Image (cartoon, grey):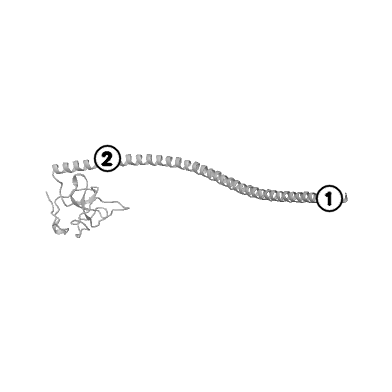
């Protein structure tokens, strides 16, 4: 079975063709291998349809994994000739079965990851839907709270306005009461002063009457 080691280069002299599958074969998936890449330098072989020098490739699919081959250089927007020529012959049957088993395990795991991804996407969609419903509910509650808050602010403002008016009214009433009290005080003082003056006048009048009576009494005996 042909093989190559890590020190092998991509030169054409060291790439010995072990076998060539005759007829058209679809090109398998490939992987990048720095030691075997680029376009073939030799004039032959050439791809069947385009008659162009092939590209060095390494298969990365099923039982042909790791086999080197020359592939058609036309890759996009055109017909691909497939495998032009195999550099490595078929692997032993046991190795091919092992490779098939490994690829089967890979596809099973990949399928499991796909299923997990689908479950995750469904769960994510469900969580997003629940989140949107909760968000809509919170927005509704927030709108209600905003309305209640606005109403509460209006009520508090009215209460403060009423208290301010009440305080102003109380201050006004207090001022009026003080003015009335001061006025009554002055009236009482004036009345008291008037009473005192009246008493003084009355006493003065009584004194004059007494003096007049005494004077009249003293004059009467002399006349007799």
Q: Secondary structure at mark 1?
A: helix
Q: Which mark is residue 112?
A: 2
Which residue is painted at 29% across and 40% down in the image? 116
Q: How many numbered marks appear?
A: 2
Q: Is residue 195 left or right of residue 171?
A: right
CA gap, disc 1 and disc 2: 150 Å
**Which residue is disc 1 drawn over?**
216
Residue 122: give x, y in percent of width and height: 35, 39
Label 2 near label 1: C-beta < 8 Å? no
Residue 32: give x, y in percent of width and height: 22, 54
Q: Is residue 23 left or right of residue 179?
A: left
Q: Is residue 109 above or below residue 193?
A: above
Which residue is painted at 66% across and 48% down in the image? 181
- Upstream in the sequence, badge 1 or badge 2? 2
Q: Secondary structure at mark 2?
A: helix
Residue 43: give x, y in percent of width and height: 20, 59
């Amino acid at each position: 079975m042909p093989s190559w080691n890590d020190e092998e280069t991509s030169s054409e002299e060291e790439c010995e063709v072990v076998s060539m599958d005759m007829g058209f074969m679809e090109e398998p998936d490939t992987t990048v291998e720095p030691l075997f890449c680029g376009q073939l330098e030799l004039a032959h072989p050439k791809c069947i349809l385009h008659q162009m020098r092939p590209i060095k490739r390494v298969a990365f699919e099923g039982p042909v994994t790791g086999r080197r081959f020359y592939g058609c250089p036309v890759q996009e927007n055109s017909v691909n000739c497939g495998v032009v020529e195999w550099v490595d012959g078929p692997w032993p049957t046991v190795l091919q079965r092992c490779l098939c088993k490994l690829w089967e395990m890979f596809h099973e795991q990949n399928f499991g990851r796909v299923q997990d991804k689908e479950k995750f996407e469904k769960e994510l969609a469900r969580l997003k839907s629940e989140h949107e419903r909760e968000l809509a509910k919170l927005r509704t509650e927030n709108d209600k709270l905003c309305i209640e808050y606005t109403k509460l602010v209006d009520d508090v403002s009215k209460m403060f306005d009423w208290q301010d008016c009440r305080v102003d009214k109380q201050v006004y009433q207090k001022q009026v009461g003080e003015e009335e009290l001061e006025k009554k005080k002055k009236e009482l003082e004036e009345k008291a002063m008037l009473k005192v003056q009246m008493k003084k006048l009355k006493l003065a009048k009584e004194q004059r009457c007494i003096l007049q009576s005494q004077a009249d009494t003293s004059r009467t005996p002399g006349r007799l």
